[in-house]
Image (cartoon, helix red, strand yellow):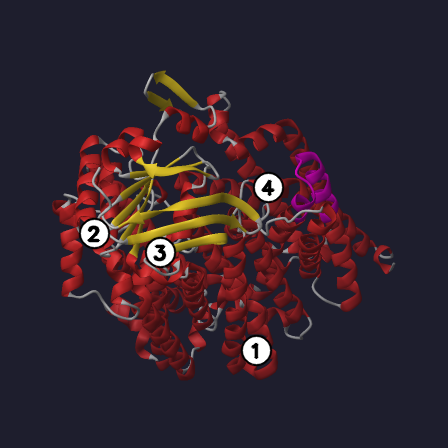
Amino acid sequence: MSEPTGPVLLRFDHASLAYGRARVVEDVHGSVHGGEAVALIGPNGAGKSTLLRAVLGLVDVVSGRIEVLGSTPARARRDVAYVPQVDTLDAQFPVSVGQVVLMGRYRDVGWLRRPGVRDRALADDALEAVGLAERKDDRFGTLSGGQRQRVLLARAIAQQPRLLLLDEPFNGVDAVSQQALLAALRRLQDDGAAVVVSTHDLALAHLACDEVCLLNKHQVAFGPTEATLTPELLRAAYGGQALELAVDSVIVAR
Amino acid sequence: MRYLLEPFGSPFMQRALAEALLLGAVAAVVSVFVVLRRLSFVADVLTHTVFPGVVIGFVVAGTSGIVWGASVFAVLSTVLITVLAGRSRVTEDASMAIVLTGFFAVGVVLVSRQTSFTSDLTAFLFGRILTVDRQQLVVTAVIGAAVLLLLGLLGKELLFRAFDPAGAEARGYRVLALDLVLNLVVALVVVAAVRAVGTVLVIALLVVPGAAGRLLSDRLAGITLIAVGTALLAGWLGLVASWQASVNHGLRLASGATVVLVLVLLYGVAAAIATARKVRA
Amino acid sequence: MSLLQDGYARRALIEALLVGALCGLVGVHVVLRRLSFFTMAMTHATFPGVVLAALVGVDLLLGSGLFGVLVVLGVSWLTTRPRSDSAAAVGVVLSAGFALGVALLSAQAGFTRDLSAYLVGSIVTVQAGDLVKTALVLAAVALTLALVGKELVFGAFDRGGMVAAGYPAGRLDLLLLLVVELTVVTSVPAVGTIQAVALIVAPAAAARLWSDRIGPTTALAVLLGMASGVVGLAVSQAYQVAAGAAIVLAACGFFVLSVVVAPVVRGRPVPLGVG
């Protein structure tokens, strides 16, 4: 992939995370530049979601540091967008696609005020960016899983973030939606934003990400995609759940 | 038409109607959130935890003390419930049931230590909408305005939290604080309803209108409109029914209970319409 | 103690023990399946049954029991419909039932007196015949739970697995709801509506804090249920307060005590939510 173009937007400095007294992730170290996409890869329970939540300031960093946009996670949160997994949401909820995307503007609109013309324009643009403008007035739950994931990305885009965190957005998503998601992410990167996406999909990591962080409760590796997604390192991360199929490609079990 | 307007010639019936409509409308708006957030049990708990406050208020300051006592306990129990629900991830079900019954038992104990036990108990629990005075109307109006103001100001954040709590938290909203506000709003409705409908029946106003709206509409605006409409209709028709039954048929039907019954009937109509729609589609 | 001196106090004590045991037995499953709100709704929705039974002249337990069956079927049907929020449905049923009961009752004379008795319970006026009925219900419920107890637990934890294994999960669920309903209509005349919920939930919730195994939990729930009855009656006599409420407060007291003491004794933190 191309050389890192932008400034460092996210830096892990030997960060270890804990819930209460239990350490859950150890020694994450690396940095993410503007314009880059980093894949967070590891088996279930490896701490990928925890790491993302730590970048949002929702998990305690017990040693080392996480620096977001040159500041602490809590203070930088305004410019960080988070895209959750779509199946955590109630499909019956009476909201329209447009309303969901507009939610991305709420924080900037502020308490006690209503979204204005500019907010609605930003929301419309974001929906356009994921290719779902024509579904704006449909109830959120009437869309397919992949389409709903795109709407959640649009919500994040409407926020105009400088750092974007996605929690397994490609799980069970159809090919069309996957393409749309990748295209929208690419546009964001071209505008200088950094993307961190947790995924199980190695092919996708190869395709779309400049760097990879291999995680299994501790950092196994953090480096350029080609150099990091090697059979040895993957086996180290997945702890024997990896199956080597051919000389230079590996299948991993979840 | 005359049949429907006949009961409201006298001032006390007019006040009862005003109270029913005011309370119904406000409770209906809140009930939309109660249904969307699945807070029916929380609402039920709050209607019971307010009871000891009602008794203490009455003992200390007579009928005018009821609202104050209820308010204090409303705030106390709202905080307790919100904290409990926030802390226990597995199930707050049992803890809330215990809080509900514990508080209610305290209320019963307090009542049983007084004289005129039985009549006061039922007045506290079922209200006496027909003896609502102008002061009570003012109290209802003030609380109603406060509730609608809170919901108007915080509506979009409450909606966001209701739809996607993880996303809201990620965005920096304090979910616990938002939940506290909504629970407080529910508690305020209970306080407003205490003298008119009583604590036990207010749960109907806090659940049924929103449930009926949800059956018939997929959009927040639609749900709210239907909920308010249902509550207003039920208030009016319920009072008419109980008055006509009493005057023309010699049948004494508790007014509060009649309003609730009409409300449930309207829910049944909504359910029938919803089913018919699905069959046709 | 003067508790055992006169006939009605003795009967009250026996009823408290029987009801406490019954509620403890059933409570374990209620807590496991998070049926507390449903139980609450049951206490309210079976009320019209009591009133109707009194109107018609039928035995109250029989009348309310049969009416309760209708309510259970109604709630079950409501919650199996798609796009229905079960909590809202339960709320609707609760409201409807209680309002119906109040309306029916208000059409009679003696409105407030009967209503209060229903709400607060009247364990001290229990007759020998009532004791027999309670004992029979206890025996029937105990037998039922002994027969299908482990299947019920299986269904509570892994309904999907149970269906896959070929069990009639739906019918077992319904059976439990009916058992809860029967327990409610039996306990309400003794301790009152809302109090019945406390006696069902609190001892079992407390027991759950002490043990992770069904057997010991059930035994402890039964014990705590009975203990609540005894303590409650004693306090009620000593301080001249409503018996039903005193029993509830005793049950809640055991729960709070368990929340505080159990983690210390067991040596590890326990989440505040139980089961």
Q: In the rendered image of this protein, does residue A153 appear above or below residue B253? A: above
Q: Which mark is residue B57?
A: 1
Which residue is disc 3 drawn over? A68
The chain that hosts pointer 2 is A
Separation (CA) of disc 3 from disc 2 = 15 Å
Q: Are the two marked residues, 3 and 2, in contact with CB atoms closer than 8 angstroms?
A: no
Q: Nearer the viewer, residue A249 or A223?
A: A223
Q: Do labels 4 and 1 share a chain?
A: no
Q: What residue type is labelled 2?
A: Gly
Q: What residue type is disc 1 on?
A: Gly
How crowded pointer 4 is (Cα within 10 Å; few <14, some 14-19, many 20+) is rated as many
Q: What stretch is highlighted in magenta?
A: C206-224
Q: Do labels 3 and 2 share a chain?
A: yes
Q: What element carries label 1?
A: helix
In the picture, measured across the screen, residue C210 lies left or right of residue C74, that is right
Q: Which amino acid does label 3 sit on?
A: Val
Q: Is the magenta stretch mostly helix, strand or loop?
A: helix
